[in-house]
Amino acid sequence: MHTRKRRRLGAKIAVFTGLCLGAAFAGLPVLWMLSTSFKANGEVFQVPPRLVTENFSLEAYRSILGDPDKLRFFVNSYVVALSVTALTLFVAILAAYGFSRYEFPLKRSVNAVIISVQAVPPITLVIPYFGLVVALGLYNTYPGLILTHIVFTLPYAIIMMTAYFNTLPKELDESVKVDGASSWTALWRVLVPISVPGMIAVGVYTFMISWNEYLFALTLTRTDNMRTVPIGIQLLMGQHSYEWNQMMAMSILGSIPVLVLFLLFQRRFIGGLTSGAVKA
Amino acid sequence: MKLANLNPTAAPPDTKVASQTPAAAGSGKLRFFARGLVPYAYLSPTVILISVLMIVPIAMVVSYSFKDNVIVEENPVLVGLANYTKVLTDPDFLVALKNTFVFITVSTVAHLVLGLTFALMLNTSLLGGVTKAVFRIIYILPWLFTVAVIAVIWRLLLDPSGVVNYLLTTVGRMQQGVDWLSDPGTALWALTFVNIWAGFPFFMISILAGLQGISSDLYEAASVDGAGAVRQFLNVTIPQLRPVLVSMAVLDLIWTSQQFALIWMTTGGGPLNATEMLSTYTYKQAFSSYEFATASASAVIVLLLSLVLAFFYVRLQKER
């Protein structure tokens, strides 16, 4: 009995040590970014390195937030990501309703196309997109970015939303339809209001994809006033002689929306995301 | 993420939708003519978007790849397979192919090992729920940052006078700092390491969900048969997780082969072409050299490679 207890304690210590090592691997780089954002640029590479600087300063944040050109990156990212999220949700809800509640001859083929679309590499699409977007006069505009982002958010959104609708009993919308309402009313009055948890998972995921997108934002915009946050961070790298503290401050400010969304909806989001990969 | 990052992501197969076919088919047939068009109406926005933004562009890039001087000139001429021969005999392309292979296989194996290890530790019954929840959030952190941020963090850490070099020289493993991302001998490995850091959390989350789905009856039965922790792991955990592990691995190969932003923002494919990948090669052909026709041929090759991997993924899903 005694040795057993001791063995359990030994295992406990081993697992805890392992977890701490892993946490250092995962977390220290992030901590270092945070710490650097509070330093003066001259102190970034001081020897020996210090995690907490003597001259704690918010100067880097002030210079980002006080610069209208840099704030513009954030405005652009919000406009694009929020529009992509709203549009994706709307289109995905319609498609998911069709998939979940109807049988029709082309169902399997359309579904197969939606699934396989996810394997298409962005780098393959960027060349024709460049041609298309220029031809349509959408080069260096919000609609150009929004439309191209949707291609990558829509398939998974439809798959997640269909899975969510499938968990809701068909009797719900049938009962409304018996009273003479159309399927459109049944969808928006009955299904959508009780699907909010599923919509949140899809919405958070969509927002993250669009907020983080880099390749299309790089190739389909040209002027600084149309650039999004990821490109803004890169521009900061080239601009002056490396302002590391500002780059880190901008990185943190640029990560806040995703971090907040994730922390708020952690459970729901992970549940929605892994149900696809695991139960499939 | 990108999600990566760009995360065209986990595809639950059509089984979910198909499984409900038999029940609905009987009554559906009768009503079909009356409301046969309704489902198509609901799907029309999706079908239009996917046609315009996916099928048309793919057709365009395929047709570009058989022509010369596309996009930059008004009337490109057909050149047959010339662009493909040009790309496939370009030493830079072959280097990119080799680098991509190393990058994606090493990343995927490391993601599997790290993801499984961390998931097993987080799934332990030895520690309390709150402790595990805190660790879980720390472990997910790398996944929550966009690729641009990850690139900036690691350029800072791996700088010649950065903190990684400081630690390595102080501990005495090295005489002087290494410029990890600019030295042709280390750049590919440094880049792969960064990608491993950025990508393991998604594996971990999925494997953790898989672990929690394994019935405890199986472990009890095994321990009744006298199996120790190692035997239980090999005979219960691994076989039960196998479907998750295999499909995650194939998905990861697809995503990692499509990685562009991380490479572009850390090394840009350099130094020389030490970290040139299929994605950066294609991008440079198009947007640095304005050789859109060769770039298209290369882009079609990348597409075919992705489709081969995706085909395996779908086959795996069907088997289950």
Image (spheres, coloured by chain):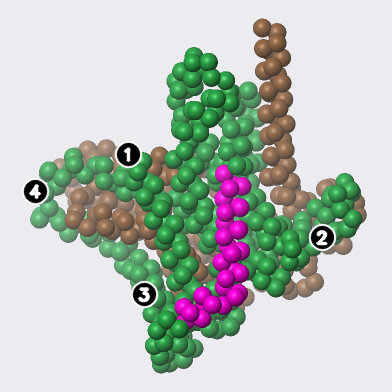
- Please tell me the numbered disc located at residue B30: 4
| Position of the N terminus of chain B by quadrant | bottom right
On screen, B154 above or below A136?
above
Can residue A169 be seen at all in this image of the molecule?
Answer: yes
Give the camera-side residue of B170 and B298.
Answer: B298
Chain B drawn colour = green
Instruction: Inspect the image, locate mark 1, and give the three-letter code of the amino acid beneath it.
Output: Thr
Q: Chain of mark 2?
A: B
Label 4, label 2: how far apart the Cα atoms are = 73 Å
Q: Secondary structure at mark 4?
A: helix
Q: Decide: few, some or many residues near mark 4? Use Cα within 10 Å; few <14, some 14-19, many ≥20.
A: few
Residue A254 falls left or right of residue A186: right
Instruction: Inspect the image, locate mark 2, and give the three-letter code of the amino acid beneath it.
Output: Val
Q: Which chain is brown?
A: A
Residue position marked by numbered label 3 in the rendering: B59
Front label number (4 vs 2):
2
Front label number (3 vs 2):
2
Residue position marked by numbered label 1 in the rendering: A167
Q: Are marks 4 and 2 on the same chain?
A: yes
